[in-house]
Amino acid sequence: MSKKTIQVLLQSDVTNLGNAGNLIDVKAGYARNHLLPKKLAVLATKNIIKQAHWRSEIRKKNAEKAKAISLNTKLLLEKINSISFKKKIGKQNSIFGTVTEKEIALWLTNILGAPIEKKQIELDGIKTTGNFSLKIKFNYQLIANMELYIFPNIVIN
């Protein structure tokens, strides 16, 4: 008795097996009894293999473009190097409220023209005026370090 394997293309992510779009070799019984009836995979014919390789190339090109965009945005942010905000202050230079990731993301999005989301920004709760470090994370382990300056908003009558 031989252990025959067949090649299938996964249609959805399968734990401990692979992600959607992967071509994998599995035992014929596993494919016939589990993967194919539940439409988790399809048998890999010549055309399906060709399409899978074509889609894989497209995904690689798109990933390279996304990485280049992230790298360019990171370099641009490092050229800018610092941003500043004016906030109303109370006693002992404490500001009313806090400076939020959402505020910073909105400001950077307006300046760069590229979307920066608040989940990309890493900063501690800022409640006073002063100088703070700011990290902006991108895909592909790219991190831009910037300085954040909080100035008091002085109103002169």
Image: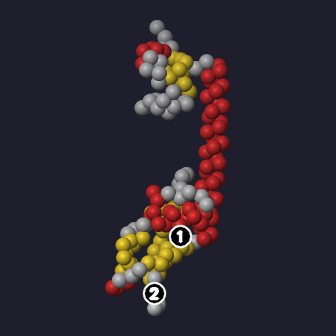
Q: Give the number of the mark in front: 2 or 1.
A: 2
For residue 155, the mark is 2
Amino acid type of the residue tagged 1 in the rendering? Met
Q: Let me know if residue 6 appears in the view.
A: yes
* Snapshot colouring: secondary structure
Query: Label 1: which residue?
Result: 146
Q: Residue at x 66, y 31 (%)?
A: 54
Residue in front for this viewpoint, 101 or 155: 155
Instruction: Report whether 35 appears left or right of 61.
Output: left
Residue in front for this viewpoint, 120 or 114: 114
Question: Between disc 2 and disc 1, whose residue precedes?
Answer: 1
Q: Secondary structure at mark 2?
A: loop
Residue 104 versus residue 5 in the image, above or below: below
Amino acid type of the residue tagged 2 in the rendering? Val
x, y percentage for residue 12? 48, 30
For residue 98, the mark is none
Q: Residue furthest left?
A: 91
Q: Residue furthest top?
A: 1
Tag count in the figure?
2
